[in-house]
Image: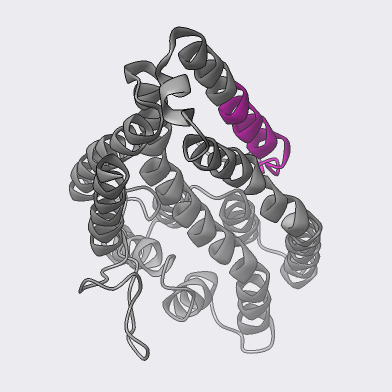
Amino acid sequence: MIAVLLALVSALGAHLAYTAVSFGWRGLGLGPRIGADPQIRFGRGRVGPDGRRAVSGPSRARMRELAAMTATMFAAGSALAFAVFGGLVPAVVVGGFAASLPAAGLRARLADRRRRAQEAWPRMIEEIRVQTGSLGRSIPQALFDVGRRGPAELRPAFEAAQREWLLTTDLDRTFAVLKDLLADPTADMACETLLVAHEVGGTDLDRRLEALAADRRQDVQGRKDARARQAGARFARLFVLAVPAGMALAGMSIGNGRAAYQSGPGQAAVLAALVMVLSCWAWAGRVMRLPAPERVFGR
C-alpha cells in the first residue's frame, strides 16, 4: 500500500510539473480554475543560419523544458511501474514510454498550429484575389495586408518578409523568406503563383488565385472529414493502454498478485505484455496518421 501511495504521489507531482511547464497552470489542482485563461506557450521556432526564426518548431528554451519534462515523466512512470510490478525491467520500459509523452504532446500541439494555418490559407488567398483584382492593389501590398490580419502563427513570417521587401524591393527574395519561414506547401504554391504573375504580368491572376483557393479549400475539407471519421478510432485507441493498466492493478490486489509479478516467469510475462501493448499503441497511431502534403516549390 505504501508503494502504491508513493507511486500516486509521484504521478501527481509529474502531472503538476508537466501542466505548469506546458500549459501554464498554477496551484495544486488537477486543472485550471474556472474562468482562468491558460495559455499554451510555444517557442517562436527554429533559427536558421541567416538568423531568421521559423514559425514552426520549438525554441531552444522549450527544448530544455522538454528535456526536463522527459526526465520527470521517466521517473514518475518508472516509480509507478516499479510499485505495481516490483521489477526493474518493466519499470524501465514503462518509464521509457512515459518519457515519450512530452515530445508527443509537443508534436501534437505543433501539428495543431500547422493545421490551423493550413485551414486559413484558402480565405487568405481569396482575400489576396479580391485586393489585387477588385481593389487594384499591388501584389506585395495585398500580400502583407492579408498577412497582418492572418492567424497569429503566420504573422511573424509575414512581418519578416515585409522587412525584406522594404529593404530590397526584391519580390523573389521576399517570397523566399516567406516560404522558408512558413515551410508550408500551400504557402509555396501561393507565393509561386503571385511571383509568376508579378514577373510575367497578364490578366489571369484572378482566375489562377480562385482555382488555387478552391483546390486548397477542397484539401482542407477532405482532411477535416478524414479526422472526423477517425474520432471514434482515436478514442478507442485509449483503451489499448487503459484496459491493460486496469487489469494489472486489479491483478496486484488479488491474492499474492504482486508477488507473482515479481517472480521470474511473472516478470517475463509482464515484459512481453508491455511490449505487445506499446507496439499496438504505436502501430495504431501510425495507421491513423494522415499523409502530410509534400512541398513542391520549397527549397
Q: Is residue 163 above or below residue 36?
A: above
Tell me where residue 111 appears, x and y as whole percent: 52, 52
**Residue at horizontal 56%, vertical 16%?**
269
Residue 284 within the magenta-colored segment of the rendering: yes
> Can residue 247 be seen at all in this image of the molecule?
yes
Tell me where residue 267 appears, x and y as whole percent: 46, 15
**Residue at horizontal 66%, vertical 30%?**
280
- The residue stretch that appears in magenta: 276-293
Residue 291 within the magenta-colored segment of the rendering: yes
Direction from residue 212 to residue 281 in the image, left or right: left
Direction from residue 5 to residue 270 in the image, left or right: right
Nearer-the-camera pick, 44 or 126: 44
**Residue at horizontal 41%, vertical 23%?**
259
Direction from residue 59 to residue 218 in the image, left or right: right
Q: Main secondary structure of the magenta part?
A: helix
Nearer-the-camera pick, 140 or 6: 6
